[in-house]
Image (cartoon, rainbow, N blue to C red):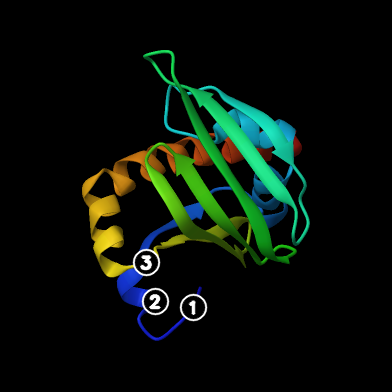
Amino acid sequence: MSNSNEASRTLSLIRTLNAPIELVWDAWTKPEHIANWWGPKGMKTKIVEHDFRVGGKWKYTMAMPDGSEFIGDGVYSVIVKLQKIFSSANFKPMTAGVEIQALFEKNGNTTNFTFNVVHPTEEYCKQQEKMGFYNGWGSTFDRLETFVSALSKEATK
């Protein structure tokens, strides 16, 4: 999905997570971990499918407060261990046809983490930003930070 105007179609969040890269990688790649942090605060995630390999599919569901189901799914396109995970992604009923990019960089006992969502058009990107991209994903990554920090503390006991 890359071309010369990718930057104008991309929304990004950058964090330094207080955990070693191996724990952050596990949090992103093991279904039993993903279920603990994926989705905004207060949402419970169910892993329906998780075939973690290039060409493999993933599908997660979350129960909305009104009882409806929020569905996320996609296909992995790039996996480089401890470095990056790229996937197509649909988050029904709000977002479709985007690429998510999770980038990991070791920084001592912490992990520099960059999350990009590349949209098909600039207009769609702007619409998604207005719909609450930074609040929704920010809340999700707050949960990720809490989860990997706890894993890190457990690992050092």
Give the spatial CA distance, label 1 vs label 2.
Answer: 6 Å
In this rendering, is residue 127 above or below 120?
above
Residue lying at 21% horizontally and 49% vertically, measured from the top left = 130
In this rendering, is residue 156 above or below 113?
above
Give the spatial CA distance, label 3 vs label 1.
Answer: 10 Å
Residue tagged 1: 2
- Amino acid marked by disc 1: Ser
In this rendering, is residue 2 above or below 114?
below
Residue tagged 2: 6
In the rendered structure, are the residues bearing label 2 and label 3 in contact, judged by CB atoms less than 8 Å apart? yes
Residue tagged 3: 10
In the rendered structure, are the residues bearing label 1 and label 2 in contact, judged by CB atoms less than 8 Å apart? yes
Q: Earlier in the sequence, mark 3 or mark 1?
A: 1
| Residue 32, x across and y down, in percent | 73, 31
- Amino acid marked by disc 2: Glu
Furthest toward the bottom, the residue is 4
In this view, the residue in front, 67 or 79, is 67
**Crowd around label 2: few <14 · some 14–19 · many ≥20 (10 Å):** some
Residue lying at 75% horizontally and 64% vertically, measured from the top left = 81
- Amino acid marked by disc 3: Thr
In this rendering, is residue 107 above or below 17?
below
How many marks overall? 3
